[in-house]
Amino acid sequence: MRVLLDANILISYLLADEDSATVSIVRAGVLGQFTLLLPEELLEEVARKACNKPYLAGKIAPESLAQLAAILPDVAETIPKITDAIPAVTRDPKDDYLLAYSLVGQADFLVTGDHDLLSLGQVGDTRIITVGEFWDLIKRR
């Protein structure tokens, strides 16, 4: 199972309680229970948001962010940066890169909390689902 986690999921992981579904999903990916896909741009987006958004910067410890940024490239399948123009598909153009990487990385699932992406349901062979839906899938395996 090949899975791309949206930046909002990784940020939620950094903010969540230890027993949350988000933490369990990220840990499952780190432990190899599914193939975690990691576009080069994704960690940049997480770091940018965690550092530049005041409501996040005060809640996310720089050490936690650094630890996540150090671990993910070692356990995930990195998807090289897409250099071609990415077509506009969503209502929010800054989400289009996730769909492109989902297709390039042959993701079975894109896990997100973004309603614009969730409203699509599926793009190509990639199902777009919530943390709760994905956690239910993992628990049934």
Image (cartoon, rainbow, N blue to C red):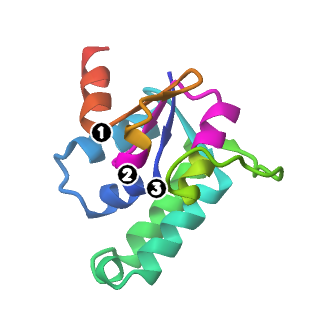
Residue 57, how many percent across, how many down?
36, 81
Q: Amino acid at mark 2?
A: Ile
Q: Amino acid at mark 1?
A: Val
Residue 90, how many percent across, how many down?
53, 47
The segment highlighted magenta reads 99-116
Left or right, 74 with respect to 128, comes to: right
Q: Earlier in the sequence, mark 2 or mark 1?
A: 2
- Report the front residue among 92 and 35: 92
Q: Which residue is mark 2?
A: 9
Q: Are marks 2 and 1 in contact (CB under 8 Å)?
A: yes
Q: Are marks 1 and 3 in contact (CB under 8 Å)?
A: no
Q: Is residue 28 above or below residue 115?
A: above
Give the number of the disc on residue 7.
3
Crowd band around label 3 with a 10 angstrom C-alpha radius: few (<14), some (14–19), many (20+): many
Task: Give SS at disc 3.
Answer: helix
Give the number of the disc on residue 131.
1
Q: Are marks 2 and 3 in contact (CB under 8 Å)?
A: yes
